[in-house]
Image (cartoon, helix red, strand yellow):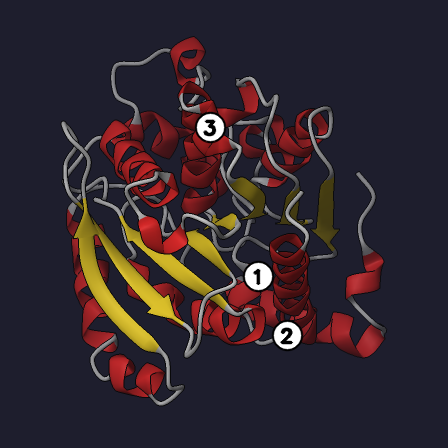
Amino acid sequence: MDIEQGWCRGERELAQIRRINKALAWAPRFRVRNRITPLAIQALLRASQFGSLIKTAKHGLRIETSSVFLDGCVPVAVRIIRPAGKAKGLVIDIHGGGWVIGNAQMDDDRNVAMVQECGVTVVSVDYRLATSTPIQGMMDDCLTAARYFLSDSCKEFADVPVIIVGESAGGHLAAATLSALKTWPELLRRISGAVLFYGVYDMAGTPSVHAAGPETLVLDGPGMVEALRTLTPGSSDEERRQPPLSPLYGDLADFPPALMFAGEIDPLLDDTVNLADRWKASADVEVYVLPESPHGFIHFPTAMAGRVLEYSREWITRRIENPS
């Protein structure tokens, strides 16, 4: 896969990325070791979010938290951000956090920008985390939310295009949701596009995950395979590679067009590249590998990250305006 040098415009911007990477080299890598550390991080995250509702409300948008459910399914919490006027489309957002931390509110900045620039309503799924539920429970939550908002019972969005967005673990859950929606083809057809940022699509680990060294940034290279096994206890690698748990190996026929991003030095690089290669047989796919970029690069203050997010919003707008 060619590296998309066009995202980084000149040595000054490349130097900006390298300064970020130099700082990250001193930071601890994220890995799943136990339940206590994620619970502590989650508590800190929630504490840091006090007051953010007031900041978000200044944009003049309507924000609410709610829960949705289907017969036989566990109720699923969602965070809904609506535009001031009528929504042109619906974005279903699935947050990241390694399946063990995070919440729907953590994506507010990105989601508010989508609402304002794309004229959409964003529903962010507050799925249960691995500290309280098996990974199947998280997949069920995301599928339940998608089925609810795509079904005829949700009149508000019955006639608008739908985009699904996921980052990291949320990328995995978004792709797994698409795979599971094969059971409801009429609902899958309602999704006009998918935007996936550096997700996990092989729960046994792609070659770049297995080859990741201890020098990797953000994610702990040697611990990633162990973490995937911790999330899927009692399963063999063959079982871990069954869809929809591992979307990479599913039937991608009838999937919508997609926009995918990964970093050149992300251990999960092969996940995106390999999924894009298979997905292209079913729909148009744009896939971009960002030079010298680690996992999570859209959160770092670089000009390149800003352009990636801006382009993703432009892509969503095009899919909303021309969904067929």
Residue topped by disc 3:
186
Q: Quadrant of the C terminus?
A: top right
N-terminal-most mark, 2 or 3: 3
Q: Quadrant of residue 62?
A: bottom left
**Quadrant of the rendered image containing residue 59:** bottom left
Tell me if 95 is positioned left or right of 215 in this view: left
* Cα–Cα gap, marks 1 and 2: 9 Å
Q: Could you tell me residue 139's position as x and y percent?
A: 31, 33
In the depicted structure, whether residue 223 falls above or below residue 293? above
Mark 3 element type:
helix
Q: As shown in the figure, which amino acid type bears the numbered disc 2?
A: Thr
Q: Residue 10, labelled with which disc?
A: none
Label 3: few (<14), some or many (≥20) within 10 Å?
A: few
Callout 1: helix, strand or loop? helix
Marks 1 and 2, the one that precedes in the sequence: 1
Q: Observer-nearest residue: 243 or 70?
A: 70
Please name the amino acid that badge 1 sits on: Phe
Q: Position of residue 69 (x, y in %)?
A: 18, 41
> Relative to 84, is 21 above or below?
above
Tell me, for residue 297, which label it has, or none: 1
